Image: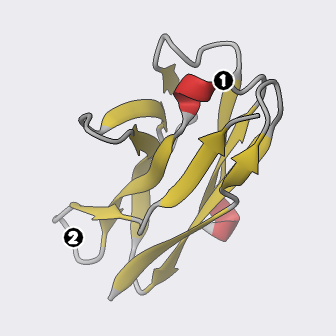
Amino acid sequence: QVRLVESGGGLVQPGGSLRLSCTAFGSFRSIADMAWYRQAPGKERDLVAKITSGGWINYAESVRGRFTISRDNARNTVYLQMNRLKPEDTAVYYCNAEITRVLPAVSDYWGQGTQVTVSS
């Protein structure tokens, strides 16, 4: 069984910073893409940033230049450093990972979500 465990959300003032972490636990062979999504109340879940196993990165236009995604493959962990936060960044942030348990199948896994609230 595989699970993704997130941490690092909270309440922050506009202009502040937060760092989210997500670690994959369980028995598996490898992790391909890792990503962060977010979902605001009444809206769809949208991609924030994605990083491949080879380090290729893609950002949503709304966070480019403010957020940084990184990963530590030895720790099976992905991070999201969020700087210059804005009220519109308020959402539940979800970690996502493409994980291979048994070759050749690749499955999508999601974390439980962590709330980020940007407010004065």
Residue projecting furthest to the right: 16
Q: Residue at x 41, y 41 (%)?
A: 37
Q: Nearer the viewer, residue 58 or 30?
A: 58
Three-letter amino acid code of the residue under disc 1: Lys
Q: Quadrant of residue 73?
A: bottom right
Q: Position of residue 102 (x, y in %)?
A: 23, 77
Three-letter amino acid code of the residue under disc 2: Leu
Q: Is residue 73 left or right of residue 38?
A: right
Query: Can residue 2 be seen from the camera position used here?
Result: yes
Image disc number at residue 36: none
Q: Secondary structure at mark 2?
A: loop
Indicate the colouring scheme: secondary structure
Query: Can residue 56 be seen from the camera position used here?
Result: no
Q: Residue at x 58, y 19 (%)?
A: 63
Q: Is residue 29 left or right of residue 83?
A: left
Q: Residue at x 54, y 37 (%)?
A: 90
Q: Which residue is mark 1?
A: 86
Q: Residue at x 45, y 44 (%)?
A: 35
Q: Secondary structure at mark 1?
A: loop
Quarter placement of the N terminus: bottom left
Q: Earlier in the sequence, mark 1 or mark 2?
A: 1
Q: Which residue is mark 2?
A: 103
